Image (cartoon, helix red, strand yellow):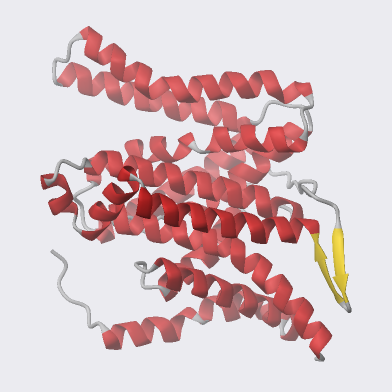
């Protein structure tokens, strides 16, 4: 291997690592705020990429019907709770409007926009708007009532949600894989190294989102509320911060980050309904590097995962996934020796 090949592999690794960084940050955010180890984070990636791909064909994406089904299930849960607690019709109607408004409006927008053949960027924005509400709905249906359960129970629920989303993804998107067009077809060469426009967009978008997340957590009231919930859930509740609202907001942000990651990575690889699992798992590995608690370490871990994957594909392409996922073992061993497990309370 000479320096030019090493440079090409490093650039490829940093590009993939930037996407893994977004997923790792979302994983850390969800665990810090809700204690949920969210295995299906990668499903948002696949849904985002597939939604854009189907809109490119001029058809209404299955995401629309999937979103409406989830919104309908959440509305039924609202009705059940309202009847059980004898809420007034006005209060029940307000709650139903709050649950259904965004999914229905976004779905109608997508149904109208799909056959119009709008530019790629506009279709990408519609795809983001379609996938982002999944976060709130999944939290409400799967996790909200279990907010006080142990981490192990929440992890088991996450595994179940993963299988459910993969199965429903096959039903709504089909088994066919799609590869999206690049957002920018330009390329820049420096010696043997070529930086494509899509890779540049991935790097810039990832950096921009990380900076925006930092500003959000440091400068906004809702961001500080999420940080307070992450540090001490009970203390945050005593200060008037709703843990349910914090959970819904965290899941909404995670769905947005996942969908954006799917739009970014969609032009670089073919995405199938179940492709998100492996992609999300690499973000999870990076999050474990950070102990599911540190955003900067998650970023470093994601870049290391990207570089390790890239160089592994050169030296032993058949075992690159094994090498990447095996790299987590010494980290787990080091953490278990450094922080012996205590009884969970």
Task: Examine the rendering and report whether any part of residue 173 can be seen.
Answer: yes
Judge whether 142 appears above or below 7 on screen: above
Asked whether, in this view, residue 226 is left or right of residue 68, the answer is left
The residue drawn where x is 78% and y is 77% is 8
The quarter of the picture where the C terminus appears is bottom left
The residue drawn where x is 54% and y is 39% is 168
Outermost front residue = 219
**Position of residue 132 measured from the top left corner of the image (x, y, whole percent):** 50, 38
The quarter of the picture where the N terminus appears is bottom right
Asked whether, in this view, residue 178 is left or right of residue 163, the answer is right
Outermost left residue = 238
Outermost bottom residue = 2
The residue drawn where x is 73% and y is 47% is 177
Which residue occupies the foreground of this view, 103 or 143? Answer: 103
Q: Based on the displayed image, in which of its 4 quarters is residue 232 positioned? A: bottom left
**Position of residue 324 measured from the top left corner of the image (x, y, whole percent):** 57, 77
**Position of residue 291 measured from the top left corner of the image (x, y, whole percent):** 36, 72
Judge whether 84 appears above or below 278 on screen: above
Q: Based on the displayed image, in which of its 4 quarters is residue 259 positioned? A: top right
**Position of residue 98 measured from the top left corner of the image (x, y, whole percent):** 36, 21
The residue drawn where x is 57% and y is 73% is 303
């Amino acid at each position: 291997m000479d320096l030019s090949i090493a440079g090409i592999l490093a650039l490829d690794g940093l590009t993939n690592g930037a996407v893994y960084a977004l997923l790792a940050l979302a994983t850390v955010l969800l665990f810090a705020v809700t204690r949920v180890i969210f295995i299906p984070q990668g499903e948002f990636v696949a849904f985002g990429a597939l939604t854009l791909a189907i809109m490119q064909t001029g058809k209404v994406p299955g995401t629309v019907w999937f979103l409406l089904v989830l919104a309908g299930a959440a509305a039924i849960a609202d009705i059940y709770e309202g009847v059980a607690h004898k809420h007034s019709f006005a209060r029940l109607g307000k709650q139903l409007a709050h649950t259904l408004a965004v999914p229905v409006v976004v779905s109608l927008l997508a149904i109208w926009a799909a056959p119009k053949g709008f530019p790629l960027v506009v279709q990408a924005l519609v795809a983001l708007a379609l996938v982002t509400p999944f976060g709130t709905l999944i939290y409400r249906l799967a996790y909200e009532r279990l907010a006080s359960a142990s981490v192990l129970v929440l992890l088991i629920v996450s595994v179940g949600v993963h299988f459910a989303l993969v199965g429903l993804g096959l039903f709504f998107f089909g088994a066919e894989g799609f590869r999206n067009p690049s957002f920018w077809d330009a390329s820049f060469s420096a010696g043997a190294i070529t930086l494509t426009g899509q890779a540049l967009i991935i790097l810039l978008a990832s950096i921009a989102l990380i900076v925006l997340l930092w500003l959000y957590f440091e400068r906004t009231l809702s961001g500080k509320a999420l940080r307070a919930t992450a540090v001490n859930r009970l203390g945050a509740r005593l200060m008037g911060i709703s843990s349910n609202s914090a959970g819904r907001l965290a899941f909404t942000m995670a769905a947005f980050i996942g969908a954006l990651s799917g739009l970014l990575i969609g032009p670089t690889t073919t995405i199938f309904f179940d492709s998100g699992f492996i992609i999300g798992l690499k973000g999870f590995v990076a999050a474990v590097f950070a102990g599911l608690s540190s955003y900067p370490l998650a970023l470093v871990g994601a870049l290391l995962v990207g570089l390790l994957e890239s160089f592994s594909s050169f030296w032993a392409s058949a075992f690159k996934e094994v090498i990447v996922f095996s790299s987590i073992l010494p980290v787990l061993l080091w953490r278990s020796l450094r922080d012996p497990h205590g009884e969970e309370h």
